Image (cartoon, helix red, strand yellow):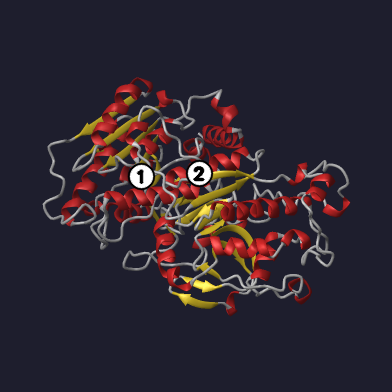
Amino acid sequence: MRFCLLALVLFQFYISCQNPNDLESKIKLPTVTIAVLVRNKAYILPYFLSALDRLDYPKNRLYLWIYSDYNSDQSIEVLREWKTFREAEYHGFYLKADELTPTLHPDEKNVSSWTPKRHRHIIRLREKALNFARRKWSDYLFMLDADVILTNPDTLKSLIWQSDSMVTGPMLESDSLYSNFWHDMSKDYTYKRTSDYQYIVTRDEEYLGCHEVPMLHSAVLVSLKHKESDYLTYDPSKVENYDGPLDDTVAFCINTIKIGSKLKLCNEKPYGYIPMPSINYSTREKDIQKLVNIKLEALSKGIVFPLDPLVSKYVTYPEPSKLTMSKIFMINLARRSERRHLMMESFKELGMDVEIYEAVDGKKLTKDDIDKLGIHMMPEYSDPFHARPMKAGEVGCFLSHYNIWKKIVENKYNLTMIMEDDVHFAPYFKEKLARVLKEAKGYKYDLLYLGRKIMLENGETRITSHTVRPLYTYWTLGYILTYRGAKKLLEANPLKNLLPVDEFLPIMFDTHPNAIWIKKFPKRQLRALSAYPLLMNPTHYTGMDGYISDTEDSIIMKNAKKKHNEL
């Protein structure tokens, strides 16, 4: 007996020490039932199903169990079409699509209502899914909400191999600090804020790993190999001494803890996304906007939601618009194709009609180019942080903006949006932009910042509810420029005293702290405003993985003689 126990322990130790990829070639992966409840999710199902299909897991080891009812959209149509083309790939594909149910439960006022009848119905379906997995002798049950987008194909394998807990979940991101777990729970079974929560969500280096939590939802992997799993339930009436709410998730989590197990939330990898939940009444338009928000969040991190051609016809995009602008420009180096692609995807999601303006590449600037353009570096300029003259990339950046200013004046564009190619748009960008423009309309501004680095926030004056008068500011991430503003910038003849463009602009609206530099530009009458809060942020900050600077990573201009050999 002791020998058998020792052998089992050694085998488990061996398994845990193996590389999952090596181990997969030697043994069959566990069987998994993936259970999904679908109601009015046609707008997001194409992405959910496409991401599910991309999971790096043998489909012949997977059961799909999907239940859909109480719909008022095309959810069932999407699911049936998907099943037609994908059913044969799985060990089993079980779709229950009930078209006879009404669109609302008897006690619901709208689809966002969480009423007793709706809760009881969800509890019953969760129990059906759990018992289905048990009957199929599945090793695991992966309970997924239909609005979870698993962008990491390794999600399922990773959760199976890394966690020793009976119940595990991948941490999901959203467009805020919302996620699919609670880090603490109050005595009355409601959410309780903790100081560590945000560090887990933002994946701070010290908080990477698997964390014990009291609540998991939306993406929950349950190991049915544990003996205690026989006592798992979503039904509050089956939980011993339960005094919590009529809620499937709360009951499941409380019961899991009561039977002596733990809930683990893993965040060592980015796994996927989940939209913000509806607080009040939701509409299809609001749901789509929340989907756009997380798609933009993912794009800012270089992730494009997968979309299978089989279901792409169910996805729609807004008609491209200039958003009341005469023109929208995005400055992009020709060799930065990946940035361009991600920005174009963002524009498609937002419905923005944008012209790509090919940036002046500092790498290609020659001494002859500088002489031909009549450029003279400001002799007194020295970078405030690095104590150095301008770099080639900074010259290219300035010329890119300068050339657009010239186009504005030549074509008499009334209002122009200019942005660089590393923009992370704020959630509800279009709605917030419209609000800012409406508020700023009566203030005769020349320049309106949408994204910048605020250097002196405390001294900035609030002008309207969502605008401020900017002080010293870095970055030219995104701004709106009027025809009058472009003329003022060109009339200052900045090429004769060249310095970085984000130093030049604060000089022109007369908030720059360097008294020597500002004397070079005696006419400083640019009227500037800034959106507050900002509507654009950088996709990456200095030091982050994936951060690239085409201005910093270039040579100092005064050393350029013929042609630069580095950026």
Residue 163's tag is 2
* Rendering quarter of residue 75: top left
Residue 168 visible somewhere in the drawing: no
Q: Residue at x 75, y 58 (%)?
A: 495
Q: Nearer the viewer, mark 1 or mark 2?
A: 1
Q: Dot 2: what SS?
A: loop
Q: Position of residue 304 (x, y in %)?
A: 49, 40
Of the 4 image quadrants, the one containing the C terminus is top right
Residue 468's tag is none
The count of marks equals: 2
Q: Residue at x 46, y 45 (%)?
A: 353
* Rendering quarter of residue 184: bottom left
335 or 14: nearer the eye? 335
Q: Establish if 219 lies above or below 176.
A: above
Residue type indicated by callout 2: Ser
Question: Can you identify the residue that label 1 sits on?
Answer: 147
Q: Do residues under tags 1 and 2 come within 8 Å of each other at their CB atoms?
A: no
